[in-house]
Amino acid sequence: MPTRSTPIVNIGILGYAGVARAHLNALKKLPYIFWSAPVRFRLVGLAGRSASGVEDAALRYGFEYGTTDWRRVVEDPQIDLLINCTPNDRHADPCLAAAALGKHLLCEKPLGRDSREARRMWDGVRRRRLCHQVSFNYRFIPAVRFARELIQAGEIGEIVHFRMRYTDDSLSSPSTPHTWRQERRRAGSGVVGDLASHVLDLGRFLVGEFRGVCGFSRIVVPRRPVKPGSRQRKPVDVEDCFVGAVEFAGGAMGTLEASGCCPGQKNFLTFEANGTRGSLRFNLERLNELEVFRIEPPSRRDRGFKTVLVTDADHPYGGRWWPPGHILGWEHTFVHQLHHLVQAILGNGTVAPLAANFRDGYLNARVCDALVAAARTGRRIHV
C-alpha cells in the first residue's frame, strides 16, 4: 500500500471541461482501483480559459491553483506530468514547451492539426528521456484488447477485410452552433480528425499499417449559428461527412465511414474484422461485448456469431473493477490508459505498443491527411 516512499507524480492539466473531466476522473480513481497504488498524485496546476471556471474547477478537483495562463502550468518546475486537453490548435506549443523542460506528456487526440504539426511534436520528444502518450483511449476497452489478443493468436486467421465506422448525430441539426471543430485553422479537419482518427488508430492497433486510401467528403451544413439561437452564421470549412476505402500494408482491405450527421447515433464506433478462419465485431455503444465467429464444421447447428461478455476474471482488466457481468463504461478507459502511462513513467514497461505514443499520433495524422487529400483530389493517395 502507499507509504511515504511511494513515488509522487505532480500533475498539471490544461482544460477542465469536456474530455478533461474524464482525465480528472481518472486521476481520482486510479489510486484505489489499481491498489496498492503505484504512485500518489499531487494535483498542482490547472489551466483554462475562464477565470471563474478555472477557480471553481481547481476547488472541485483539489488542485493547488488554477490559472488562465497555460504557460504557468507548463513552466511550473514542480510538475512532472502534463495532461493536455485543449483544442487541437493548442496541442503543439504547450507540449513542446513541456517536453523541453523534461515533463512527461499525455495529449488528447488528434496529436496535431495535420501530419506536419504532429511530426514536429514527435521530433520534439523522440530524443528526450520522457514518456509521451496520445489519448487514443479506445485501445483500453477490454473488448478491444481481447480482439487484439484473438487476432494476434491467429484465432480468425489472416485478416482480409476490416470495416470501420464512427458516426454520431452531433451535427445533424442546422441549428447546432459553430465551434472550433468547424474551423480548419483550429481543428485541422472535421470528422476525419475528430472521429475517424479514433477508428483509424484501432485499425493500426489491430491490423497494421495503412498503404493507401481513397474517399469522398461533404460539408452538409455550410453555415452554422455563432451561438445558440443566433441568426448570425459562420461558415464551416471542414467536412462533416466522410466515406472512404483503405488498403493495409499486409494486404487487407477496409472501408471507413465518419459522420456527425446520423440522427439517432450517439457514439457509434464499430469495427468488423473478417479473417480466413472467422470474424470479430465490436460496437462502442455495447462496449462490454465482442461478437466472435469461428468457422465451424458443417454439422454444427448453432453456427453464427457468439456474443462474448468481456467481464470475466480472465478477460483484459477482468477482476480489476466489479464482479463478472457488472459492466464498465467509457470513463474507465481513461483510468486504464493513465495507469499504463504511470507504469511507463516508473520504468515498468513502455508506452508503445499497447498505448499510442507521439510516433503513433504522427502516423495517424499522416493517414488523416491522406484521407482529406483523397477527398479533395478524387485520387487514391499512397500513405
Image (spheres, rainbow, N blue to C red):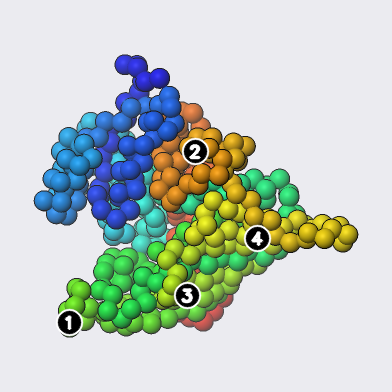
Residue bearing the label numbered 2 = 322
Which sits earlier in the primary sequence, circle 2 or circle 1? 1
Q: CA distance from mark 1 to mark 4?
A: 45 Å
Residue bearing the label numbered 3 = 242
> Is 250 drawn above or below residue 107 in the view shown?
below
Q: Nearer the viewer, mark 3 or mark 4?
A: 4
Which sits earlier in the primary sequence, circle 1 or circle 4? 1
Residue bearing the label numbered 4 = 273
x and y, in percent, of residue 214 in the image: 55, 74
x and y, in percent, of residue 33 in the image: 42, 33
Could you say which is closer to the camera, residue 202 or residue 96?
202
Visible residue check, residue 176:
yes
Few, some or many residues within 10 Å of mark 1 (<14, 14–19, 20+): few
Q: Nearer the viewer, mark 2 or mark 1?
A: 2
x and y, in percent, of residue 76 in the image: 20, 36
Q: Secondary structure at mark 1?
A: loop
